[in-house]
Image (tube, grey):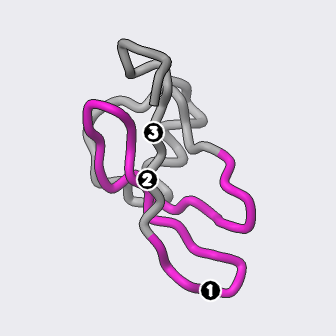
Amino acid sequence: MTEERLEFQRAAGAASTTPNTRGPPQIPDHQLLRLIGEGAYGEVWLAKSVMGTFRAVKVVYRENFNDERP
């Protein structure tokens, strides 16, 4: 894990102790604040929209699936 990622987790107060080597994904019009959950297919992030609304953003990674079909 990079030092930058560790610093992000400390600053954001990330709840997960599982190393996230990807770092926060880029979501248009949202600032990802902290990783709040992980599962077999992806991650759930606490995010704040440009309007100031807090949201949970689920990020599903295609590479976590055995088949390319939806």
Labelled pair 3, 2 in contact (Cβ < 8 Å): yes
Q: Residue at x 42, y 66 (%)?
A: 56
The amino acid sitting under disc 1 is Gly
Give the numbered dot on residue 60: 3
Q: Which residues are magenta?
A: 26-55
Give the numbered dot on residue 58: 2
Alpha carbon distance from label 1 to label 2 = 18 Å
Question: Is residue 44 shown above or below 54?
Answer: above
Q: Secondary structure at mark 2?
A: strand
Residue 50 in magenta stretch:
yes
Alpha carbon distance from label 1 to label 3 = 24 Å
The amino acid sitting under disc 2 is Lys
**Residue 14 in picture, x, y percent from top left:** 37, 53
Left or right of residue 56: residue 33: right
Front residue (pair 40, 2): 40
Q: Secondary structure at mark 3?
A: strand
